[in-house]
Amino acid sequence: MEDTFGRNIRYLRLSVTELCDLRCRYCMAEEGICKRGHEELCSFEELREFTAAAAALGVTKLRVTGGEPLVRRGIVELCAMLRTVPGIEELCLTTNGTRLEQLAAPLKAVGVDRLNISLDTLRPERYREITRTGELENVLRGIEAAERAGFENIKLNCVLLGGMNDDEIGDFVRLTAKKPWQVRFIELMPMGVCAAWPPERFLPAQEVLSRVPELRPAGRSGVAQLYRLPGAAGTVGLIEPMSCAFCADCTRIRITADGKLKPCLHSDAELALRGLSGAELEAAIRQGILMKPARHRMDETGVTETHRGMFAIGG
């Protein structure tokens, strides 16, 4: 399933909700979002059907996202349904970790293979400041629960926020010394509420190497360039959508919680899938893949083209 630029599309990011129990300053307004009616969001059956159609066309990796996917009622049952889709070899989930203490074991039991956990600070007061509503201890207990449940290769996603959390780069890197985690530093993108933030908030991921010069190259993992401290159990990943766009290697498509296929995170192009089934649904997904642009233009324009916030796309 190739797009017009020869990229083999095999990765689907499936958003199951736009809601979140946090209000991270770079992602969502303090008052949250207008809650959609139940009928506006895809049912479990629709989400599975979309996944099955994408898998029939060659998708092998599925990532469940949000919003915060663990706030969706019945998320464990939904993951169990998605795990049964023929052709899906890897089922992953991205979460803020606040509900993992209760849900890590059930998610593992129904076949979720891997977790990405968002964590932008290791300091309790700063965590409350960035998230507006969260408690760091809940996430830390969630990570411990994920390890007890048997999740391996846990990834921690840290968005680099100049003047807000960049003084913790060394603290995050040192987590990998004894833990077999991949701590990933992600460049802040000019989307949604942070699009008008001052330039000093947007740090290049290479700043991590300047702050921790003992890091050594350790290959790649997906879109992340990997580094490792000498003798460390884990790795450090740099994800650079702004300073070093990886669009040429993009193998993913996204489906939003309201049933729109987005060929590109940063494009406003969308294709409605709800109401389609069978060959018609597969044809629509093929069409969406052919709509994938060669690359985003954020490095030129300084802003994304999509009208949706990240919480409404699925990242």
Image (spheres, helix red, strand yellow):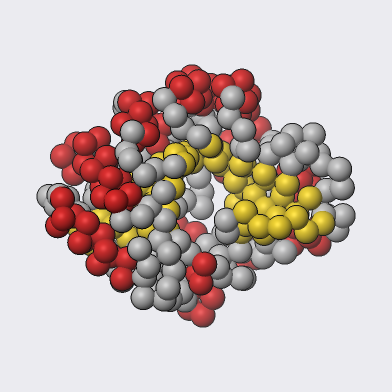
| Residue at screen point 67% across, 44% down | 182
Image location of residue 288, percent across then percent down: 28, 65
Whether residue 214 appears in this view of the structure is yes
Q: Is residue 305 left or right of residue 179?
A: left
Give the residue furthest to the left: 275
Whether residue 30 appears in this view of the structure is no
Q: Is residue 298 left or right of residue 54?
A: right
Image location of residue 146, percent across then percent down: 57, 26
Image location of residue 68, percent across then percent down: 42, 38
Q: Quadrant of the N terminus?
A: bottom left
- How many marks can you see? 0
Rendered position, 170 above or below 57: above
| Residue at screen point 37% across, 67% down | 2
Image-quadrant location for residue 110: top left
Image-quadrant location for residue 203: bottom right
Rendered position, 28 above or below 68: below
Give the residue furthest to the bottom: 300
| Residue at screen point 31% across, 71% down | 291
Q: Is residue 267 left or right of residue 178?
A: left
| Residue at screen point 83% across, 48% down | 229
Rendered position, 200 above or below 176: below
Is 169 in front, or is 290? 290
Is 112 in front, or is 212? 112
Is 246 in front, or is 34? 246
Image location of residue 43, percent across then percent down: 21, 37
Q: Is residue 233 left or right of residue 184?
A: right
